[in-house]
Image (cartoon, rainbow, N blue to C red):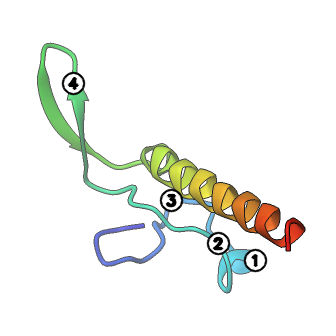
Amino acid sequence: MDERGHPLDFSNWGDAYQQQGILAPGENILGAKPGGSTERLSDTSFATPISDCFRRRRLRLLVKLDRQLVHC
């Protein structure tokens, strides 16, 4: 998503994800550059670590809730 929270024009955001899906920052992301400096870049791959963390936390929560329901 861009800095305003809108899907990026160059992403594969389609109609299927308008009602459900995960948006993560992918524009103007500060990253490391060879030689020790930094630069700001835009690409959907920059959103991957953020969306993966969200997915893992959500899955962990669902597993925890499922275990609690089994022990009721």
Q: What element carries label 3?
A: loop
Mark 3–mark 1 Cα distance, whole angstroms, equals 16 Å
**Residue ID at (68%, 76%):** 17
Amino acid type indicated by mark 2 = Gly
**Tag 4: Cα neighbours inside 10 Å, few (<14), some, or many (≥20)?**
few
Question: Quick one: SS at disc 1?
Answer: helix
Mark 3 or 1 closer to N-term? 3
Residue 66, by quadrant, is: bottom right
Residue 32, percent from left and from top: 23, 28
- Residue located beneath label 1 in the image: 16
Q: Is residue 66 left or right of residue 58?
A: right
- Circle 3 Cα neighbour tier, 10 Å, few/some/many (<14 / 14–19 / ≥20): few
Q: What residue type is labelled 4?
A: Lys
Q: Earlier in the sequence, mark 1 or mark 2?
A: 1
Residue shown at 85% from the left, 66% from the top: 71
- Numbered tag placed on residue 55 in the rendering: none
Mark before the other along the chain sequence, 3 or 2? 3
Identified at 14% across, 13% down, the residue is 35
Q: Identify residue for label 2.
A: 21
State the residue position of label 3.
10
Under circle 2, the secondary element is loop
Q: Which residue lies furthest to the bottom in this view?
A: 19
- Pointer 4 and pointer 2: residues touching (CB < 8 Å)? no
Residue at mark 4 to residue at mark 1: CA–CA distance: 35 Å
- The quadrant holding residue 6 is bottom left
- Mark 1: amino acid: Ala
Instruction: Locate residue 46, reporting x and y percent.
Output: 42, 45
Residue corresponding to mark 4: 33
Instruction: Identify the residue at image location x=51%, y=68%.
Output: 23
The answer to whether the residue labelled 3 contacts the one labelled 4, judged by CB atoms less than 8 Å apart, is no
